[in-house]
Image (cartoon, rainbow, N blue to C red):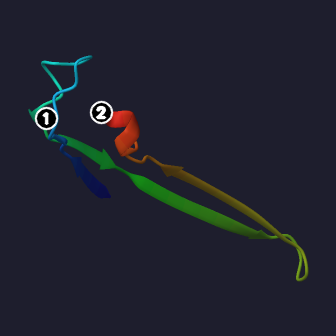
Amino acid sequence: MTNTQYQREGIYQNGGFPDNSLGRGDQLTFTGIGAKGGITYKVTGKHLVDVNAGYITRAPSLRNTF
């Protein structure tokens, strides 16, 4: 399990976004979860069958957040 936090601090006021560009933004928190597992089935002494699966969630990148 992971925890990622982002907070933007604008040091210039942009004319395109005058209300949102200057000052601190909201702190955003993202929780990521990951799990993986597998099983091996032995058919004969020399033949094996492996099955693996995983599920992983990650926080969005900083560029996609703000």
Locate residue 37, reporting x and y percent. 56, 62
Image quarter hosting the C terminus? top left
Locate residue 40, reporting x and y percent. 71, 69
State the residue at coordinates (35%, 50%): 32
Residue found at the very far bottom of the displayed protein: 45
Mark number, residue 25 = 1
Image quarter hosting the N terminus? bottom left
Locate residue 43, reporting x and y percent. 86, 70
State the residue at coordinates (43%, 46%): 57
Q: Is residue 29 depicted above or below 20 in this figure?
A: below
Q: Is residue 15 depicted above or below 32 in this figure?
A: above
Residue 28 placement: quadrant? top left
Q: Are marks 1 and 2 in contact (CB under 8 Å)?
A: yes
**Viewer-nearest residue: 18 or 26:** 18
Residue found at the very far left of the displayed protein: 23
Crowd class of label 2 (few under 14; some 14 to 19; many from 20; radius 10 Å): few
**Viewer-nearest residue: 64 or 18:** 18
Secondary structure state at the residue bearing disc 1? loop
Locate residue 24, reporting x and y percent. 9, 38
Q: CA distance from mark 1 to mark 2?
A: 9 Å
Mark number, residue 66 = 2
Q: Is residue 38 depicted above or below 59 in this figure?
A: below
Secondary structure state at the residue bearing disc 2? loop
Answer with mark 1 or mark 2, whichever residue precedes in sequence.
1
